[in-house]
Image: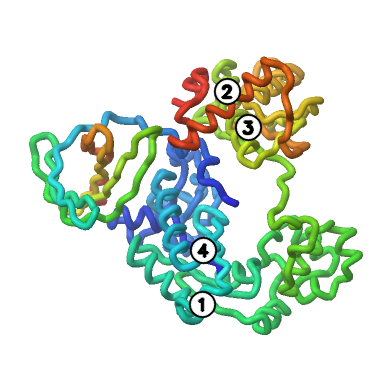
Amino acid sequence: MHIDMDAFFASVEQQVNPALRGKPVIIGGRNNKYRSIICAASYEAKARGIENAMPSWKALKICPDAIFVPADTTKYVYTSDQIFQILQNFCPQVEKFSVDEFFLDIDGCQGLFGSALDMGLAIKKKIKQRFGLTCTVGVAPSRITAKLAAKLHKPDGIAVLSKKEVLTLLTTLPVEKICGIGPRLKERFHYLGVYTCGDLVQYPNSLLKKQFGVVGLWLKAACLVEDISDIPFFADGKPKPKSVGHSQTLRYVSTDQDFIHDWFYLLSEMVAQRLRRQKLQGRTVYIYVADGFKGGHSKRKTFIEPTYDGYEIYQRCLEIIDIFPCKELLVRVLGVSVSNLEPANAIYLFDKDIKRERLIQSIDHINNKHGEWTVYPASLRCARY
Amino acid sequence: MFSNDSRWDRHTPDQSREEDVIEVGVIFRKNKIIPTCFVWRHEKYVIEEITYYWQERRGGYILHFFSVTHHSNVYQIYLHNIHMCWRLKDVCPNS
């Protein structure tokens, strides 16, 4: 079962402020409503042509009376956590796919709540009662088809599809409707004459693997509503990340090198935290800078020692900045990413490294207990405020 | 698996204005705090509806936020769980 909250951020804001209900609401960044990206739009705004990820100036041009609300992520994250808890009361096997999407493995739970349809309706009712929010429920034999079922019945819908119904639906369904097929993959499929999921199913496995790798096999298996757990890409149930990165758009174009370096340090710490959480470390560091007007610069460098230490990643960033063609950085957007990943299982021999490792573990322990960024390097204050 | 903790901006408090301390009348019912009225700048505001509730963890303490209405205006008030102090975070005039 797939649960997808309808226009989640915008719906939460409409609940918070009743004056926004029934009006086109767009949610964007906190700093400047004309220099932001739309991260959510209410259905009233979507009906006027506003799409997610659209620049806010463009959205306000299309719909000048749209009400711009700065995003307040704590509100959305708290609501998402509460919804997750509600879902756990229905089914022990719940996975948070994103802040507004959840997967439930309802095999074995249906005896408690009746059919899948009854269970879906009960979940919708509970969420509506508690938060006043609507969601769309899709039930199908696999994750990808459940997500597809929900996508086709938005907003405030519910769809329960059997395997036979899914296969019939997929025969004529455009291939880009499947989760995981974006504009570029769609173009490649079209080039090969694959326009519908039915065409994809007919495509030989050997050619599919040659063209798209295991992703191709995975997509075909998804269209056939088959179990994908024996495909290497998903062998242990989760895709392996190729890289871990973070980027940030600053409030203004900055030439202050200290400020820019602080931001690199902050992004390095964020990347390092995610690496440690996933028990990974990486050798290649990639940095990206852009002034927001012309194209950006990027550089990568592979180091001998893998790391998940934020300070070490930051030092490597500085090393890469030194080999940048422009000496004075002019920055609006910057990003840090670490690739060439491997499991983090290093054993340290020297006192200095052991102490550093203990410090990182202690910081992680405090932050896990009291909330992220309870303890952070003092030099990050400049970037933080 | 999606992680809520992977975004920095989640932890960046909006410090655009000083938040006023307010006095709040509350009812405690079934393990819930229900604010009924508040006094801000010597004026009493009777809460007509609690439109939303959420929590925010900041280090060792938790802020309990309530979005409440008075004469169609929306006020965001919060309770600091350690200092037991109420503050007014934001006012959204009905527009």
Determine the chain carrying the residue at label 1. Answer: A
User: Which residue appears at 22% of the width and 57% of the height?
Assistant: B30
Label number found at residue A110: 1
Residue B93's x, y, as percent? 24, 47
Determine the chain carrying the residue at label 4. Answer: A
The residues bearing labels 1 and 2 have C-alpha atoms spaced at a distance of: 47 Å
Determine the chain carrying the residue at label 2. Answer: A
Work out whether mark 3 precedes mark 4 in sequence or the reverse, and give the earlier one: 4
Give the residue at mark 2.
A359
Asked if marks 3 and 2 fall on the same chain, the answer is: yes
User: Which residue appears at 46% of the width and 39% of the height?
Assistant: B10
Give the residue at mark 3.
A272
Please indicate, yes or no, whether residue A297 appears anywhere in the rendered image.
no
The residues bearing labels 3 and 2 have C-alpha atoms spaced at a distance of: 14 Å
Residue A272's x, y, as percent? 63, 32
Determine the chain carrying the residue at label 3. Answer: A
Which structural element holds mark 1? helix
Work out whether mark 1 precedes mark 3 in sequence or the reverse, and give the earlier one: 1
Query: As shown in the figure, which amino acid type bears the numbered disc 1?
Result: Gln
User: Which residue appears at 63% of the width and 20% of the height?
Assistant: A356
Q: Count neighbours of disc 4 (C-alpha within 10 A) and say few if under 14, some if 14 to 19, many if 20 or more.
A: few
Please indicate, yes or no, whether residue A306 appears anywhere in the rendered image.
yes
Residue A208's x, y, as percent? 86, 64
Work out whether mark 1 precedes mark 4 in sequence or the reverse, and give the earlier one: 4
Q: Quadrant of residue A358?
A: top right
Query: As shown in the figure, which amino acid type bears the numbered disc 3?
Result: Ala
Q: Count neighbours of disc 1 (C-alpha within 10 A) and say few if under 14, some if 14 to 19, many if 20 or more.
A: some
Left or right: where A130 falls relative to A251: left
Left or right: where A268 falls relative to A251: right
In front: label 1 or label 3: 1
Which structural element holds mark 4? loop
**Toward the viewer: A27 or B52?**
B52
